[in-house]
């Protein structure tokens, strides 16, 4: 009888420890290092997922440049205001996250404003924002567990290195 009680107690203790380990809070921490011509232009550490949900990494420095677009229809001439971001921006969005697999979407911009010019006719003139530089949208990145991945940036001047660290808190 004593042996059965000890066995039941040991089983209950093991079950309790396993349940508390599974219920422990967790987080997916992302380390970001973005290089241009071998120099770091952005770096950071960000919790992209934890027990409270997922979070996007966004680092921006630059400006919104406004411009106007003119369109003519048989009924009216319409002027529409818009803007375009010029500067440096790195956006990393979680797409799917579980404990072992993480999929992210990366968008990166590193542009410079060259100015604006007018286009169209005298009765319907639009503005065009002239920029040059690097821009990539929705680059897919996948992690399996803790690992470091170099994101293919399609420009030899840029390198983006992401490291994922699943952690229990």
Image (cartoon, grey):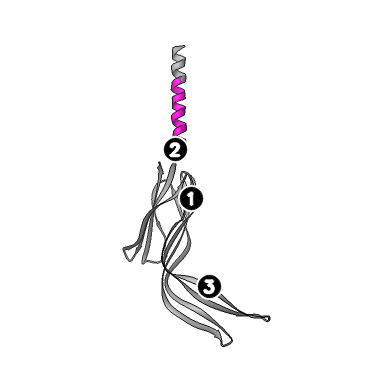
Going from N to C along the chain, the mark reached first, 1 or 3, is 1
Q: Quadrant of residue 86?
A: bottom left
Structural crowding at the residue carrying mark 2, measured as other residues with C-alpha within 10 Å and reported as few (<14), some (14–19) or many (≥20): few
Q: Is residue 86 above or below residue 40?
A: below
Structural crowding at the residue carrying mark 1, measured as other residues with C-alpha within 10 Å and reported as few (<14), some (14–19) or many (≥20): some
Viewer-closest of 38 and 11? 11
The tag on residue 24 is 2
The tag on residue 35 is none
Residue 50 placement (x, y as % from top left): 46, 46
Q: Is residue 80 above or below residue 155?
A: below
Q: Quadrant of residue 169?
A: top left
Going from N to C along the chain, the mark reached first, 2 or 1, is 2
The residue most toward the left is 39
Q: CA distance from mark 1 to mark 3?
A: 30 Å
The residue most toward the top is 1
The residue most toward the bottom is 122
Q: Secondary structure at mark 3?
A: strand
The tag on residue 54 is 1
| Pointer 3 residue | 82
Q: Are marks 3 and 2 in contact (CB under 8 Å)?
A: no
Which contiguous range is marked in magenta? 9-20
Q: Is residue 74 above or below residue 165?
A: below
Viewer-closest of 32 and 72? 72
Is 138 magenta? The answer is: no
Please report the residue visible at 43 percent of the width from the left and 79 percent of the height from the top.
115
Q: Mostly what secondary structure, the magenta segment?
A: helix
Going from N to C along the chain, the mark reached first, 3 or 2, is 2
Residue 14 placement (x, y as % from top left): 44, 26
Structural crowding at the residue carrying mark 3, measured as other residues with C-alpha within 10 Å and reported as few (<14), some (14–19) or many (≥20): few
Q: Secondary structure at mark 2?
A: loop
Q: Secondary structure at mark 1?
A: strand
Viewer-closest of 144 and 84? 84
């Amino acid at each position: 009888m004593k042996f059965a009680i000890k066995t039941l107690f040991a089983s209950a203790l093991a079950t309790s420890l396993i349940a508390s380990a599974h219920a422990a809070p967790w987080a997916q921490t992302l380390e970001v290092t973005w290089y241009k011509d071998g120099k770091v232009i952005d770096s950071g550490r960000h919790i992209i997922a934890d027990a409270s949900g997922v979070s996007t990494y966004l680092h921006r420095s630059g400006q919104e440049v406004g411009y106007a677009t003119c369109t003519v229809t048989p009924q009216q001439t319409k002027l529409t205001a818009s803007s375009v971001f010029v500067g440096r921006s790195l956006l990393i969005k979680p797409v799917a996250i579980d404990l072992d697999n993480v999929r992210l979407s990366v968008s990166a911009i590193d542009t410079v404003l060259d100015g604006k010019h007018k286009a169209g006719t005298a009765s319907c003139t639009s503005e065009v924002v002239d920029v040059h530089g690097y821009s990539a949208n929705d680059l897919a990145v996948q992690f399996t567990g803790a690992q470091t991945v170099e994101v293919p940036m399609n420009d030899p001047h840029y390198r983006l290195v992401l490291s994922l660290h699943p952690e229990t808190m």
